[in-house]
Image (cartoon, rainbow, N blue to C red):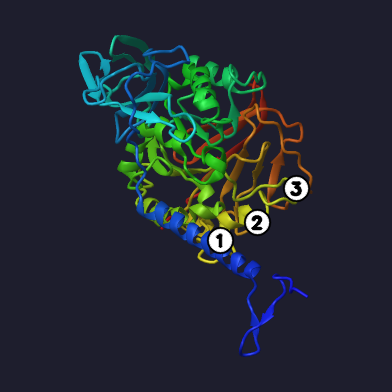
């Protein structure tokens, strides 16, 4: 009878001959390995590109916004007294070879730059955004800076409060995981709180550490647009810094970060100044604080491991150059936590350990806890898991006066909650089992004292604690 072609056959030497099924398996595995290697090489060798894809020049935005200035936000710039004013318009037939200038007017000074075009060519090739980012220099001693924006025939005006290096009582609002209101129809978010804090002069700086809008790229980016409009009453009044989370990775978390890289490209100036050359991780200084923003997904998402290695090298160089006489406080902000509790899934077990000490994968990057301890980082603020908790000062899993306080503030609103399904760890100082939406408010009073308060969306305190530095020595 005929042999089943899937049955191994004897070759001339008496050994087993590979079946065609086996050969296909080998080819598929080989293709997958080659693909992963090529993608890894791509993430290492190819720079983050900000130029646009070709268009036919005839598109008029169907979102109904045309060339109107919108989604205004301010971020720190490349040094003291410098800020970057950012906004978006939609492509409205401008000549790509001779784009109008993005203009910011402050008093008698005019600042200008050439905008860039961004098209999500994979999913929405017909929708093009014009990305504006203009670095400005504010007058010394300014407490409030009125500013005007111009592009084509569109204008916008507002004012923001700059914060200077060396000032005491810096007030900072920090959190992760925040959805929009208008498009997502969420009413349980911290957006009204943020707008109120900024509008009533109750915060000087906002840091949003990942998972922005849920998601920036969804519905051809309209969800991201609506979110940025929702927060404009905050982001146009005080510096509002964005860091990446796993939801910014896009494209099935293959680390494209398209919308994040383009929408927030003005933050790349902080990257250039701090040596990272990217807006995925960078540092800046305000008040008495050296802030570090990291891309924590690089330690968890295998396609980004190369970025973790680069990031660790940059982080050590950055921390080693901090002058604690100027910025006695060092705060690290990242999306995923080094210390957290939730349940038995990976987020607060294997993934947090990967950030702390590395993991078991071949060629995996080292963790970062050793660097944070070596260079005397004071506080780490994270999001990702949707609840609030904090630790005692902890080092290598043990409570220690030389350790770091870790704050988990991942419940700014609109994304549900992650219930605590395990007992508290010995290093855990507080967990909010009522899962109240809110943000972390910090005040850095002076070189030795800082207060941290978790507040709910009505502005009421959930938890508060004081951090006191006792003659810590630094490398």
Residue at the image position 75 percent from the left and 73 percent from the top: 2
Quadrant of the image containing the C terminus: bottom left
Circle nearer the N terminus (2, 3): 3
User: Which is nearer the eye, 290 or 56?
Assistant: 56
Vertical placement of residue 471 versus 174, above or below: below
Residue at the image position 32 percent from the left and 32 percent from the top: 77
Is the residue marked by circle 2 packed among few (<14), some (14-19), or many (20+) residues within 10 Å?
some
From mark 2 to mark 3, how far is it between C-alphas?
Answer: 12 Å
Is the residue marked by circle 3 packed among few (<14), some (14-19), or many (20+) residues within 10 Å?
some
Vertical placement of residue 296 versus 443, above or below: below
Numbered badge on residue 350: 2
Is the residue marked by circle 1 packed among few (<14), some (14-19), or many (20+) residues within 10 Å?
some
Q: Position of residue 390 (x, y in %)?
A: 65, 42
Numbered badge on residue 358: 1
Q: Position of residue 305 (x, y in %)?
A: 49, 56
- What SS does tag 3 mark? loop
Quadrant of the image containing the N terminus: bottom right
Dot 3 corresponds to which residue? 343
Q: Position of residue 463 (x, y in %)?
A: 67, 33
From mark 2 to mark 1, how far is it between C-alphas?
Answer: 9 Å
User: Which is nearer the eye, 414 or 459?
Assistant: 414
In the drawing, does residue 2 fall left or right of residue 313? right
Q: Are marks 2 and 1 in contact (CB under 8 Å)?
A: no
The image quarter in which residue 190 lies: top right
- What SS does tag 2 mark? helix
User: Which is nearer the eye, 109 or 309?
Assistant: 309
Circle nearer the N terminus (2, 1): 2
């Amino acid at each position: 009878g005929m042999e089943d072609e899937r049955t191994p056959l004897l070759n001339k030497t008496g050994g087993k001959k590979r079946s065609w099924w086996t050969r296909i398996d080998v080819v598929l595995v080989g293709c997958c390995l080659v693909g992963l290697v090529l993608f890894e090489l791509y993430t290492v060798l190819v720079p983050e590109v900000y130029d646009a894809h070709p268009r036919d020049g005839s598109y008029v935005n169907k979102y109904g916004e045309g060339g109107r200035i919108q989604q205004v936000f301010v971020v720190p710039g490349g040094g003291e007294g410098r800020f970057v004013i950012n906004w978006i318009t939609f492509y409205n037939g401008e000549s790509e070879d001779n784009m109008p200038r993005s203009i910011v007017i402050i008093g008698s000074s005019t600042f200008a730059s050439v905008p860039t075009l961004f098209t999500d060519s994979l999913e929405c090739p017909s929708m093009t955004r014009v990305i504006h980012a203009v670095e400005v220099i504010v007058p010394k001693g300014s407490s409030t800076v009125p500013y005007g924006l111009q592009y084509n025939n569109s204008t916008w005006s507002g004012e923001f409060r700059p914060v200077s290096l060396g000032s005491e009582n810096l007030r900072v609002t920090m959190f992760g995981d925040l959805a929009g209101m208008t498009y997502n129809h969420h009413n349980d978010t911290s957006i009204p709180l943020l707008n109120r804090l900024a509008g009533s002069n109750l915060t000087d700086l906002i840091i949003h550490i990942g998972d922005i809008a849920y998601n920036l790229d969804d519905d051809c980016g309209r969800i991201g647009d609506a979110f940025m409009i929702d927060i404009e009453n905050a982001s146009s009044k005080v510096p509002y810094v964005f860091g990446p989370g796993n939801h910014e990775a896009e494209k099935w978390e293959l680390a494209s970060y398209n919308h994040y890289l383009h929408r927030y490209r003005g933050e790349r100036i902080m990257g250039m100044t701090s040596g990272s050359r990217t807006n995925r991780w960078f540092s800046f200084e305000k008040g008495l604080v050296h802030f570090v923003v990291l891309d924590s997904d690089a330690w968890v998402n295998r396609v980004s491991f190369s970025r973790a290695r680069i990031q660790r090298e940059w982080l050590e160089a950055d921390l080693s150059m901090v002058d604690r006489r100027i910025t006695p406080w060092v705060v690290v902000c990242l999306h995923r936590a080094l210390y957290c509790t939730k349940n038995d899934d990976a987020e607060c077990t294997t993934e947090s350990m990967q950030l702390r000490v590395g993991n078991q994968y071949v060629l995996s990057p080292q963790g970062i806890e050793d660097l944070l301890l070596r260079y005397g980082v004071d506080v780490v603020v994270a999001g990702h898991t949707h609840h609030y908790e904090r630790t005692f000062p902890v080092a290598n899993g043990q409570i220690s006066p030389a350790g770091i306080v870790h704050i988990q503030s991942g419940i700014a609103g609109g994304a549900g909650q992650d219930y605590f399904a395990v007992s508290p760890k010995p290093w855990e100082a507080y967990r909010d089992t009522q899962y109240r939406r809110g943000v972390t408010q910090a005040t850095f009073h002076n070189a030795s004292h800082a207060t941290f308060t978790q507040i709910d969306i009505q502005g009421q305190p959930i938890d508060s604690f004081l951090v006191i530095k006792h003659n810590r020595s630094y490398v």
